[in-house]
Amino acid sequence: MITYTDSLDGITADGLRGGFFDGWGSPPTPETHLQILRGSFAVVLALDGDRVVGFITAVSDGVSAAYLPHLEVLPAYRGQGIGTALARQMLEKLNHLYMIDLICDADLQPFYERLGLRRYTAMIRRNYAAQSGTFELAD
């Protein structure tokens, strides 16, 4: 049975191994993934027992705006409504804010529209050299 929590108590890097960031050219390590979770304004985790099988994160000023950078469900757990449950819970947590934004690929837009978000125009910049969450500064 899948359960949901917004607590990181007991979550370790070892518990984040096994397929997150599917399709990324240079995915974060489980240790970096844990840093992402800890550095987020809000998180919701999907658990199968004590195994993390999905997560969503938000960065926010806590007053006016939030951005949802990550929503991931392990490939073996997709198609079970876990991503929808994670997104709904996060949107409820952030409901007091004026704006909640995210960027997604066109094929994911219908998923987010079903949750009440709407298409909009955005600008982005990607530094793929830093995709894994680790980088070194040049001298």
Image (tube, rainbow, N blue to C red):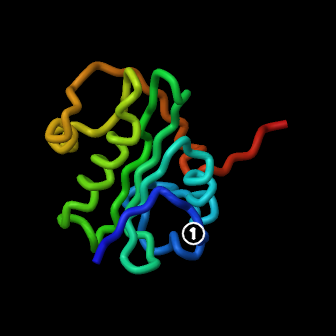
Above or below, 19 relative to 64: below
**x, y percent for residue 66:** 45, 30
Image quadrant occupied by the N terminus? bottom left
Instruction: Left or right? Give the position of 89 relative to 128.
Output: left
| Residue type at numbered disc 1 | Ile
Q: Between residues 12 and 76, which one lies in front from this camera angle?
A: 12
Instruction: Left or right? Give the position of 94 relative to 135.
Output: left
Above or below, 51 relative to 35: below
Residue tagged by mark 1?
Answer: 11
**x, y percent for residue 102:** 36, 33
Q: Residue furthest right?
A: 139
Occupied quadrant, residue 96: top left
Q: Between residues 121 and 8, which one lies in front from this camera angle?
A: 8
Q: Between residues 138 and 59, which one lies in front from this camera angle?
A: 59
Residue at point 51%, 69% (across, down): 16
Q: Residue furthest front?
A: 96
Q: How many marks can you see?
A: 1
Residue at point 34%, 62% (across, down): 73
